[in-house]
Image (cartoon, grey):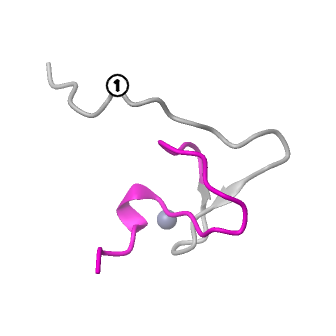
Amino acid sequence: MRNKGFKKRLYTPREGESWICAKCGKPIDALPFIPSKGRPVYHRECLPPRE
Ligand SMILES: [Zn+2]
């Protein structure tokens, strides 16, 4: 079994709240962290490359 990386806890948006990916514009179901308000959030695959 390969469970690497699946032990992290995932957070979901609160009721009435929604997280929209800043790149593709689709809602995000869960994130491994709670995003700050006003900060853009991304799907893992939409994350901008590190500079
Ligand atoms: Zn996205």
For label 1, the SS is loop
For the C terminus, give its image quadrant. Answer: bottom left
Where residue 44 sits in the image (x, y, percent)?
A: 39, 57
Query: What secondary structure characterizes most of the magenta part?
Result: loop
Residue 5 in the magenta stretch? The answer is: no
Percent coordinates x, y for residue 30 in the rendering: 55, 42
Instruction: Write the residue at 63% across / 68% down.
Output: 39
Q: Is residue 21 left or right of residue 14?
A: left
Quadrant that contains the N terminus: top left
Residue at the farthest right position: 16
Residue 38's quadrant in the figure?
A: bottom right
Residue 4 found in image quarter: top left
Q: What residue lies at 66% left-to-right and 58% top-to-bottom?
A: 36
| Rendered image quadrant of residue 6 | top left
Q: Percent position (x, y) of residue 31?
A: 52, 45
Expressed as whole percent of the image width and height from the top left, the position of residue 17 reads 79, 50
Residue 7 in the image: above or below residue 37: above
Residue to which mark 1 is pinned: 7
Of residues 14 and 39, the one nearer the viewer is 39
Q: Amino acid at mark 1?
A: Lys
Neighbor class of circle 1 (other Cα within 10 Å; few <14, some 14-19, many 20+) is few
Magenta part of the protein: which range? 28-51
Residue at image x 29%, y 74%?
A: 50
